[in-house]
Image (spheres, helix red, strand yellow):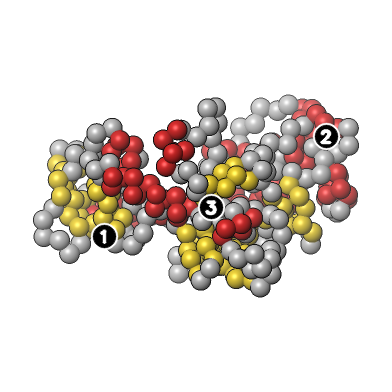
């Protein structure tokens, strides 16, 4: 957004708490290895990448011909979307129950009204598939039961296991169902962080300013508008005409001066966030698998998925070594 503003004649100031740009799109470096915090890919619809980005990222992108995903389930690694050979390796009773529920829902064509995340998915996938795959993974990621989450979350944040995915691997029948996994994408040769650094340099070249390692001390407002920003350790506040904030809402509300009413401060403190710990293991082998991502819905695994950055770009690790990343959703502390 800062670059977009700068290229349209504004002079934006970006204040970043960390010592480097990118946020979750930073790249961690350890010796010859580069590791992103998961797989951050670039995909474009319609006319493809905008020409100005294509010029900026020239020589810095690696094209991946297809996205490879596996699902770790019942002691097996199954390619996703599921195939006929995958279905044959799953427990037949659970598989038959899930398929029967899916077909029953499909034929009945009910009008789903799910009041929460669990009901929304059960009305579309059946209870068995929710208990088996989607529910355990969601509860691991969010840390609360599905009935406590808004159904809107199911439309945007879920493993895309559906009745179509489950039946797509069945011979003959599977031809009726789509297998909608994006077939190709672009990835930063040396990680997403390198692309963020290019954007930062372009921002500065266009007249924008970027302050790294800075924390706001207060955000001043008057008559319903943000007016000034004071940074920690500074004596003079910066004038503000527009503020775009990615500060967590409880922290942003606490920074406001004058302070909001007590009930607003209390409401902000009640907001909860889910944290994520990423553990990266450097392994003395060429690669673990060909996967970009492997999902682990079962509760016996503390991590929700693994990723191998080298499979998105061979430039991320030396030829005979690799890094396997583990994503562990958790609460702060």
Give the x, y percent position of residue 296. 68, 58
Q: CA distance from mark 1 to mark 3?
A: 29 Å
Q: Tag 3, which secondary structure? A: loop
Task: Find the distance from the CA under tag 3 to the CA under tag 2.
Answer: 36 Å
Q: Which mark is residue 214?
A: 1
**Mark 3 or 2, nearer chain start:** 2
Q: Nearer the viewer, residue 312 or 13?
A: 312
Pointer 2 residue: 174
Q: Position of residue 15 (x, y in %)?
A: 27, 53
Quadrant of residue 318 in the image? Answer: bottom right
For disc 2, the neighbor class at 10 Å (few under 14, some 14 to 19, many from 20) is: some
SS state under label 2: helix
Q: Is residue 326 left or right of residue 30?
A: right
Q: Is residue 195 left or right of residue 130?
A: left
Extreme front residue here?
59
Q: In the rendered view of the protein, which quadrant contains the C terminus?
A: bottom left
Residue where numbered disc 3 is placed: 189
In percent of the image, x 55 and y 56: which residue is there? 38
What crowding class fits label 3: few (fewer than 14 Cα within 10 Å), some (14-19), or many (20 or more)?
A: many
181 versus 248 height, above or below: above
Q: Residue at x 77, y 32 (%)?
A: 177
Residue drawn at x 76%, y 50% as measured from the top left: 79
Q: Residues within 10 Å of mark 1 (few under 14, many from 20)?
A: some
Q: Nearer the viewer, mark 1 or mark 3?
A: 3
Within the image, what quadrant is residue 332 found in?
bottom left
Of mark 1 and mark 3, the one earlier in the sequence is 3
299, 59: nearer the viewer:
59
Of 67 and 62, the residue lying toward us: 62
């Amino acid at each position: 957004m800062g670059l977009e503003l700068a290229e349209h004649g504004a002079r934006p100031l970006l204040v970043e708490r960390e010592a480097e740009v990118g946020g979750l799109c930073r790249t961690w470096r350890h010796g010859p290895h580069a590791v992103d915090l998961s797989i951050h890919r670039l995909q474009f619809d319609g006319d493809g990448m905008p020409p100005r980005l294509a010029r900026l990222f020239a020589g810095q992108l690696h094209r991946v011909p297809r996205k490879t995903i596996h699902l770790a389930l019942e002691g097996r690694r199954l390619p996703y979307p599921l195939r006929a050979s995958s279905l044959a390796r799953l427990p037949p009773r659970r598989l038959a129950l899930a398929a029967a529920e899916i077909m029953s829902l499909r034929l009945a064509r009910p009008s789903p009204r799910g009041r929460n995340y669990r009901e929304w998915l059960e009305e579309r996938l059946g209870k068995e598939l929710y208990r088996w795959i989607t529910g355990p993974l969601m509860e691991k990621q969010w840390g609360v039961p599905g009935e406590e989450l808004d159904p809107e979350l199911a439309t945007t944040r879920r493993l895309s296991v559906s009745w179509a995915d489950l039946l797509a691997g069945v011979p003959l029948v599977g031809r009726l169902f789509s297998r909608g996994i994006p077939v190709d994408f672009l990835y930063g040769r040396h990680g997403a962080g390198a692309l963020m650094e290019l954007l930062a340099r372009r921002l500065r070249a266009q007249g924008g300013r970027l302050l790294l390692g800075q924390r706001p001390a207060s955000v001043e407002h008057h008559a319903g508008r943000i007016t000034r920003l004071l940074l920690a350790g500074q004596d003079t506040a910066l004038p503000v005409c527009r503020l775009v904030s990615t500060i967590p809402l409880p922290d942003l509300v606490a920074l406001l001066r004058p302070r909001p009413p007590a009930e607003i401060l209390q409401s902000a403190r009640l907001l909860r966030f889910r944290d994520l710990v990423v553990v990266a293991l450097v392994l003395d082998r060429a690669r673990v698998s060909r996967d970009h991502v492997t999902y682990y819905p079962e509760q016996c695994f503390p991590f929700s998925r693994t990723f191998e950055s080298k499979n998105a770009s061979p430039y991320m690790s030396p030829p005979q070594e690799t890094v396997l990343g583990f994503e562990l959703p958790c609460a702060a502390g």
